[in-house]
Image: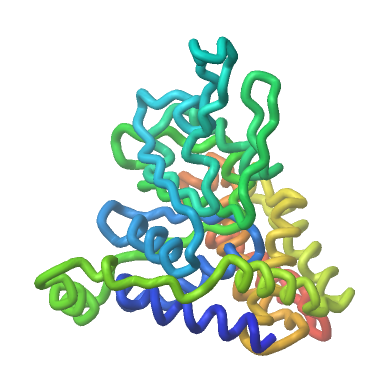
Amino acid sequence: MELVQNVVNRVTENVRQVIVGKDEEVRLTLLAMLCEGHLLIEDVPGVGKTMLARALALSVGCSFRRIQFTPDMLPTDVTGVNIYNQKTQEFEFRSGPVFAQIVLTDEINRATPKTQSALLEAMEERQVTVDGETYPTPKPFLVLATQNPIEYEGTFPLPEAQVDRFMMRIHLGYPSKQNEIDILNRQSDHHPIHDVRQVLTADELVAAQRAIRTVYVDDLVKSYIVDLVTTTRDHPDVYLGASPRGSLALYHTSRAWAAMNSRDYVLPDDVKRLAEATLAHRLIVNPSARIKNVTARQVIEDALQHTAVPGARARAR
């Protein structure tokens, strides 16, 4: 697991030049990349969501494209379109920005649901179909989507099917006072994003992804993951619980987290640590529970308390 830890340390140190005081969030972003999953970053404007994605792409040396979503954007602006070539008298496919190794979809909830859904096939099947022709996306392939909280004007809720395809959701939050002063100092003469250099090759990233697949997960831990997800489905405050895709996300991220911490086996604590990031965005809380200000995060915390850890007892309700 030394390879995985080395990869994480190099990229984290490099991204730290731009993202101040958010090492844990940077590690979670890397976690999604190592698991070949996609990441949803939800927070208010101006806290560094876009800079995090740019710094990560520069660090890894992958091809990078940014899609700035707007209400008037069409699906073909994302996937590409067939254009008639008058010289050859044939249609030619002009690929869209989704055909990059790291795709930043900025403010994804400002686009209409039709355009948002254009990403579904690419995220799940690593391919895009246009006019009956299928085109594979490059490897590695990661979608980093940023969105503003739904309370802001001019936003459209993401379809449940698309939210479920994001392996994790994280929040950056406002920096502390000292970190914000540090940000001012770093940008006094130029933006630190221009100092970020490639510290990792795509081949090294793929090798780290392979190494994670060798991490051992005991059957008791697998059972704990499934029990935890099942608890979210049976929770009285939940209208729609986590899907089997949520179980897979928790399983894969737990293996990667163990590898990032120099272990070749998964502990129940790894599962607990990543439960909120991998499951909370998949839950839909009942309207009656929302009136009482019950959140998906609280549901996850309650599920963790009432799901028996291997070798221990669950807390009684």
Q: Position of residue 58 (x, y in %)?
A: 41, 64
Scheme of image coloration: rainbow
Residue 13 showing in the rendered view: yes
Q: Residue 287 appears at what percent x and percent y?
A: 53, 39
Is residue 53 found left or right of 153 in the rendered image?
right
**Image quarter hosting the N terminus:** bottom right
Which residue is found at the position 44% from the left and 69% from the top?
A: 59
Q: Is 16 on the left-hand or right-hand side of 3?
A: left
Horizontally, is 310 left or right of 286 in the view?
right
Q: Residue furthest left?
A: 189
> In this rendering, is residue 42 above or below 67?
below
Residue sitting farthest toward the right = 219
* Image height of 233 relative to 203, above or below: above
Query: Which of the 4 quarters of the picture holds residue 91?
Result: top right
Q: Nearer the viewer, residue 91 or 24?
A: 91
Identify the residue shown where x is 36% and y is 23%. 72
- Asked whether residue 294 appears in the rendered view, the answer is no
The quarter of the picture where residue 227 lies is: bottom right
Q: Nearer the viewer, residue 92 or 107?
A: 92
Q: The C terminus is located in which quarter?
A: bottom right
Residue 174 rendering spot, x and y as whole percentages: 28, 66
- Tell me: residue 108, above or below residue 237: above
| Location of residue 176 by image quarter | bottom left
The residue at 49%/67% (across/down) is 60
Residue 159 lies, in percent from the top left, at: 56, 35
Observer-nearest of 161 and 228:
161
Look at 77% across and 84% down and name the residue there: 265
